[in-house]
Amino acid sequence: MAHAIRVHKYGGPEAMSYEAVDVGAPGAGQVKLKQHAIGVNFIDVYQRTGLYPQPSMPFTPGNEGAGEVTAVGEGVTDLKVGDRVAYAGAIGAYADERLAPADKLVKLPDAIPYETGAAMMLQGMTVQYLLRRTYKVGPETTLLMHAAAGGIGLIACQWAKHLGATIIGTASSDEKCALAKAAGATHMINYKTENFVERVNQITGGKKCDVVYDSIGKDTFPASLDCLKPLGLFVTFGNASGPIDAFNAGILAAKGSLYMTRPTLNTYTATRADLVATAKDLFDVVASGAVKINVNHKFALKDAAQAHKDLEGRKTTGSIILLP
């Protein structure tokens, strides 16, 4: 019998229960997967708590994983039984077997293990669009990356270094600062002991940054805006400390005609062509060794609640996976 994590009512980590489930056969446009590894991300927390409401209850959380195709539904032509695949953005990942929409899956190159594939799809493809499309990062770029020692942060530090950028990172401890520095950050700021706005000003000689990437939300806003050059771009892509509340758009004018965007991976990979291109770019930098995926925490699937506790308690660095 297959097993999955189910949420019957929004709440804390204890809202997740490990249950036997009947997976069934894939329908049109679907495949059945035997999952080898499952990624854990903050979006899973937002879904569990109801910040991102789900269409029906109970539901299985989780948005990324990697595994093997065991059955193919009607109309699926580009995948076959035995294919190694990975995905992000198909909710229902916290399970040892699942049905998944074929158009959300990409073939995982043989050079990349399942655990790496599951740990990197959501975070890695997020970094791809952030650095390559939301703002085109290059050798002339000075950027600020909050949570530089987190899963996205460590990938972004490596990838931005590969692109030649100057990277200023923030983290909550000296240990995390050292980790991000090792991953490629040019400068690190411990925001518990230093004022990050003042330090950015010092580091840049008053020139400030072209772009700020912020997955923290409430705690770093509006201070993040004070780290930007005139016409700079503020990219808010997560709410680890809570959402940014309504703000007066005039603040963008007052601080230098700034731009602000709230991108999502779903939008950037909405077409099959964009999804495949985004994944290919990620697979290329990982396979080349330019970006290494740090799978620093592994939990059994049944222990998903503990994984969430550690993630929310800021006790994790790099990527977290569940193993069926």
Image: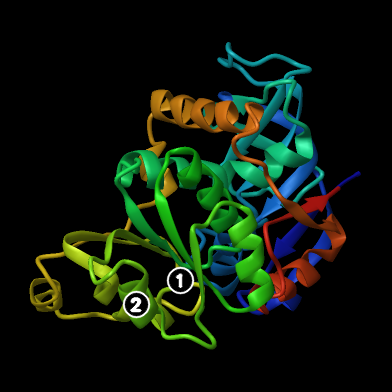
Residue 234 percent across, percent down from the top left: 28, 63
Question: Nearest the camera: 128 or 183?
Answer: 183
Q: Is residue 239 above or below residue 5?
A: below
The 10 Å Cα crowd at callout 2, few under 14, some 14 to 19, many 20 or more, is: some
Q: Which residue is situated farthest in the front direction here? A: 205
Q: Which residue is situated farthest in the right direction here? A: 1
Look at label 1 and name its amino acid: Asn
Look at label 2 and name its amino acid: Ile
Residue 87 percent across, percent down from the top left: 61, 37
Residue, disc 1:
239
For residue 244, the mark is: 2
Question: In the picture, which quadrant includes the N terminus?
Answer: top right
Q: Is mark 2 on a helix, strand or loop?
A: loop
Residue 74 percent across, percent down from the top left: 60, 17
Residue 227 percent across, percent down from the top left: 29, 71
Q: Number of labelled discs? A: 2
Q: Is residue 313 above or below residue 68?
A: below
The 10 Å Cα crowd at callout 1, few under 14, some 14 to 19, many 20 or more, is: some
Question: Nearest the camera: 75 or 118?
Answer: 118
Res. 199 image quadrant: bottom left
Q: Residue at x 15, y 80 (%)?
A: 248
Left or right: 67 in relation to 213: right
Left or right: 54 in relation to 274: right
Query: Do residues under tags 1 and 2 come within 8 Å of each other at their CB atoms?
Result: yes
Q: Residue at x 78, y 17 (%)?
A: 82
Q: Which residue is situated farthest in the top direction here? A: 77
